[in-house]
Amino acid sequence: MTQHQQQAGGTDEPPMDVEPAHVMKREKHHQREHHERLAQEAAEGRK
């Protein structure tokens, strides 16, 4: 790895287009879990 590549890419920071996709995926998964929990609680409340 040359000095130029290290400055451009770096090893600490991921490329800008990699991080947001990962974060968005995690957010969607979290929201879905929350929604499923609410639906389950509502179903149990109706019994």
Image (cartoon, rainbow, N blue to C red):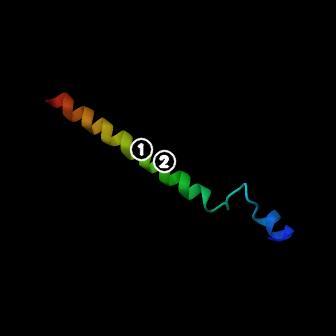
Residue 35 falls left or right of residue 22 = left
Residue 31 falls left or right of residue 5 = left
The residue carrying mark 2 is 27
Task: Examine the rendered structure and indicate whether residue 8 appears above or below residue 23.
Answer: below
The secondary element bearing badge 2 is classed as: helix
How many numbered discs sit on the rendered protein? 2
The three-letter amino acid code for the residue at tag 2 is Glu
Q: Residue at x 66, y 60 (%)?
A: 16
Question: In which quarter of the view is residue 4 placed?
Answer: bottom right
Name the disc covering residue 31, or none. Answer: 1
Whole-percent x, y for residue 22 in the image: 54, 55
Q: Residues within 10 Å of mark 1 (few under 14, many from 20)?
A: few
- Do the residues under discs 2 and 1 have CB atoms within 8 angstroms? yes
Task: Examine the rendered structure and indicate whether residue 47 appears above or below residue 20.
Answer: above
**Cα distance between the residues tagged 2 and 1:** 6 Å
Q: Nearer the viewer, residue 5 or 1?
A: 1
Task: Examine the rendered structure and indicate whether residue 26 appears above or below residue 40.
Answer: below
| Quadrant containing the N terminus in the rendered view | bottom right
Residue 20 falls left or right of residue 10 = left
The secondary element bearing badge 1 is classed as: helix
Question: In which quarter of the view is residue 20 placed?
Answer: bottom right
Q: Residue at x 42, y 44 (%)?
A: 31
Whole-percent x, y for residue 36 in the image: 31, 42
The three-letter amino acid code for the residue at tag 1 is Gln
Q: Residue at x 48, y 54 (%)?
A: 25
| Quadrant containing the C terminus in the rendered view | top left
Q: Residue at x 44, y 50 (%)?
A: 28
Residue 2 falls left or right of residue 42 = right
Name the disc covering residue 15, or none. Answer: none
Whole-percent x, y for residue 23 in the image: 55, 51
Task: Examine the rendered structure and indicate whether residue 2 appears above or below residue 35.
Answer: below
